[in-house]
């Protein structure tokens, strides 16, 4: 009789265990597949629907024309206080708010920074001469020495190094007739010489960025090259500045298709001094997270304003 009961257990319980185990396996496969699909979403789509941070902190004149790096676990911020460039560093983003500010070069604006082989590189724009000048130092806080000058009439310089070892310097063209268009310089060295690849949007520009492509910044992600910028239609000076992104061909330096609007001013902190404007998008691989930092464009000195970021669900891959 005991043998009969044992057989009943084998024929009844074991199949249940089998199907239960099968269900766990199927659920796990679906879960892993969902993670893979989410992690492989196109970057533009993932940023467009990404998580928006609250305002990180304010500075007395806004977080203007900034560049941001993370080197060996330390954040390095270069920003423009509406008069000259200030440099700050801290181990956390929040720590930047109270970090000591250094002025590396008097009257220099629109900064970009790079760190390479123990040398800090800084580019700032001098509006009265319409030139961007390159400075170097062994220390982030300086002192900085003048190195070379970029072509006349190119502002909002943003410098990055590609996987191929080529340096990119994107710019806003302030020369007469250029309509503040974004363009690209390339070089084999941070010291130049720089080759001008021309404007990135070589066809007609969409209406929303036909008036200006401010604060252009180039970065690489998962084998592709992207340009972010602040687009303005040129019609309303207090409104309509939005964050945009487009894929760029590194060979031609031209946009691949049309640009996508990532974000307009939608939150209370996005509006200051009557200005509903966002600008200065800078992409950063932040501890494996894909983040696009940006700021509110207060468009006037003496008005506090802040910054934040969009975080894509994609893990950061260069």
Image (cartoon, rainbow, N blue to C red):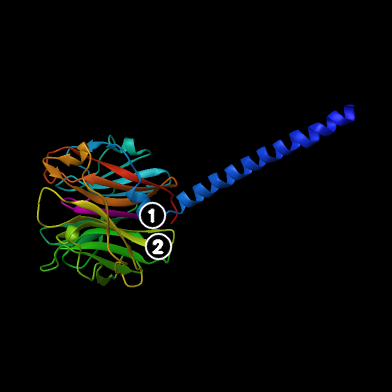
Q: Position of residue 302 (x, y in %)?
A: 12, 39
Magenta region, residue range: 105-117
Q: Secondary structure at mark 2?
A: strand
Q: Position of residue 223 (x, y in %)?
A: 43, 62
Q: Is residue 116 magenta?
A: yes
Closer to the camera in the image, 209 or 318: 209
Q: Is residue 274 magenta?
A: no
Name the quarter where the C terminus is drawn: bottom left
Q: Are marks 1 and 2 in contact (CB under 8 Å)?
A: yes
Q: Is residue 74 above or below residue 41?
A: above
Residue depicted at 23% across the width and 62% down the height:
171
Q: Quadrant of residue 119?
A: bottom left
Q: Secondary structure at mark 1?
A: helix
Say which residue label 1 marks: 43
Q: Main secondary structure of the magenta part?
A: strand
Residue depicted at 42% across the width and 66% down the height:
164
Which numbered dot is residue 108?
A: none
Q: How many marks?
A: 2
Q: Is residue 79 left or right of residue 178?
A: right
Residue depicted at 11% across the width and 44% down the height:
300
Q: Position of residue 254 (x, y in %)?
A: 29, 69
Q: Is residue 120 visible?
A: no
Say which residue label 2 marks: 224
């Amino acid at each position: 009789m005991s043998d009969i009961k044992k057989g009943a257990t084998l024929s009844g319980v074991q199949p249940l265990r089998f199907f239960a185990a099968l269900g766990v396996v199927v659920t796990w496969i679906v879960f892993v597949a969902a993670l893979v699909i989410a992690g492989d979403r196109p970057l533009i789509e993932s940023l467009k629907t990404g998580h928006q941070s609250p305002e990180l902190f304010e500075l007395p004149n806004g977080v203007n024309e900034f560049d941001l790096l993370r080197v060996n676990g330390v954040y390095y911020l270069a920003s423009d206080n509406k008069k000259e460039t200030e440099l700050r560093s801290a181990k956390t983003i929040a720590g930047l708010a109270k970090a000591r500010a250094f002025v590396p070069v008097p009257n220099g604006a629109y900064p970009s920074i790079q760190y390479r082989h123990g040398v800090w590189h800084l580019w700032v724009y001098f509006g009265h001469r319409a030139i961007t000048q390159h400075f170097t130092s062994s220390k982030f806080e300086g002192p900085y020495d003048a190195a070379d000058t970029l072509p006349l009439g190119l502002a909002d310089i943003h410098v990055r190094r590609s996987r191929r070892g080529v340096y990119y310097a994107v710019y806003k063209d302030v020369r007469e007739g250029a309509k503040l268009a974004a363009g690209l310089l390339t070089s084999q060295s941070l010291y130049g010489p720089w080759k001008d690849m021309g404007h990135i949007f070589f066809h007609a520009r969409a209406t929303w960025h036909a008036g200006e492509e401010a604060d252009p910044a180039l970065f690489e992600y998962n084998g592709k090259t992207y340009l972010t910028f602040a687009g303005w239609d040129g019609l309303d000076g207090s409104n309509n500045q939005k964050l945009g992104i487009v894929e760029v061909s590194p060979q031609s330096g031209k946009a691949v298709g049309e640009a996508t609007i990532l974000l307009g001013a939608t939150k209370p902190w996005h509006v200051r001094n009557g200005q509903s404007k966002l600008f200065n998008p800078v992409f950063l691989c932040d501890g494996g997270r894909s983040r696009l930092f940006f700021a509110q464009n207060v468009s006037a000195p003496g008005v506090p304003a802040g910054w934040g970021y969009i975080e894509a669900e994609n893990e950061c891959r260069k």
